[in-house]
Image (cartoon, rainbow, N blue to C red):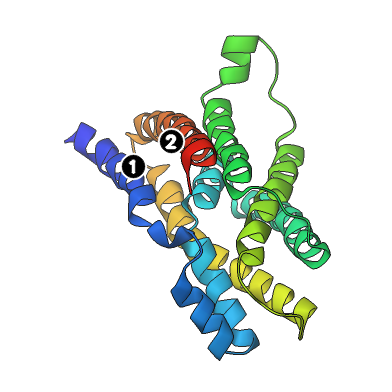
Amino acid sequence: MKYFKVGFPLFFLFCLPFGLAAHGVSSADQQILQEGGLWSYILVGAKHMVTGYDHLLFLAGVIFYLSGFKDIVRFITAFTIGHSITLISATYLGIKANEHLIDAVIALSVLYKGFENLGGFEKVFKIKSPNLLAMVFLFGLIHGFGLSTRLQAFDIGREQFLAKIISFNVGVELGQIVALIPIVWIITAWQKRESYQSFYKAINVYLVLAGIGLFIYQIYGYYYGH
């Protein structure tokens, strides 16, 4: 029973990336943006974050490391500021990157967080891990650039250009809040259980494996995707 309790959420997280295919750009989303006003950009932004398994896996890894609501708010705020900077500025200035390459770096952020949570820096490199708040902000910048590549893949025209970008960003923030509520609840509730250490290790091992898998997937897409 103990292994089932640990394995079930691990299995759920393992299946999550394959069940969230909507993470990419779709013609349905393009139609929503064409037919709706600024609210449609909020909707699509929220949808993108809720289905953005790579972003959520990284944030789950960050939350594992924290204790207390104030810490969670502080670190999520740093991440939010980081991705808002690059999402808005890169989109407004038209700075682009290959989506597979930027998503490969985002995959490495998932790997990094799982590795750090397992004490990898101390065990493997015999050094202290880098300042977490600074790293969360840095990875926020990278994740924001990834979000920008998705937004720039849409035809959003030039009318109300900045307002559309900001609306998309607002949607991302709202989607992030909605997605994080169950993640925070599960992790904080599990901290009271005897099986928490097993749960902690199992999920962070998964984050390492998921990061590696997603990185390989994106590199393959870069070389062989169409």
CB within 8 Å, label 1 to label 2: yes
- Residue 172, numbered label: none
**Which of the 4 image quarters holds residue 105?**
top right
Residue type, label 2: Ala
Q: Nearer the viewer, residue 35 or 206?
A: 35
- Taking the spot 53% from the left edge, 76% from the top edge, the residue there is 30
Label 2 Cα neighbours within 10 Å, binned few <14 / some 14-19 / many ≥20: many
The location of residue 115, given as percent across then percent down, is 54, 26
Residue type, label 1: Phe
In the rendered view, does 2 fall on the left or right side of 176?
Answer: left
**Which of the 4 image quarters holds residue 144?**
bottom right
The location of residue 120, given as percent across then percent down, is 56, 19
In terms of secondary structure, where does tag 2 sit? helix
The location of residue 184, given as percent across then percent down, is 48, 54
The location of residue 28, given as percent across then percent down, is 44, 76
- Tag 2 residue: 210
What's the CA distance linking mark 1 and mark 2? 8 Å
- Taking the spot 51% from the left edge, 51% from the top edge, the residue there is 56
- Residue 14, numbered label: 1
Q: Quadrant of the N terminus?
A: top left
**Where 161 falls versus 18 (above or below)?**
below
Q: Nearer the viewer, residue 81 or 29?
A: 29
**Where 22 falls versus 143 (above or below)?**
below
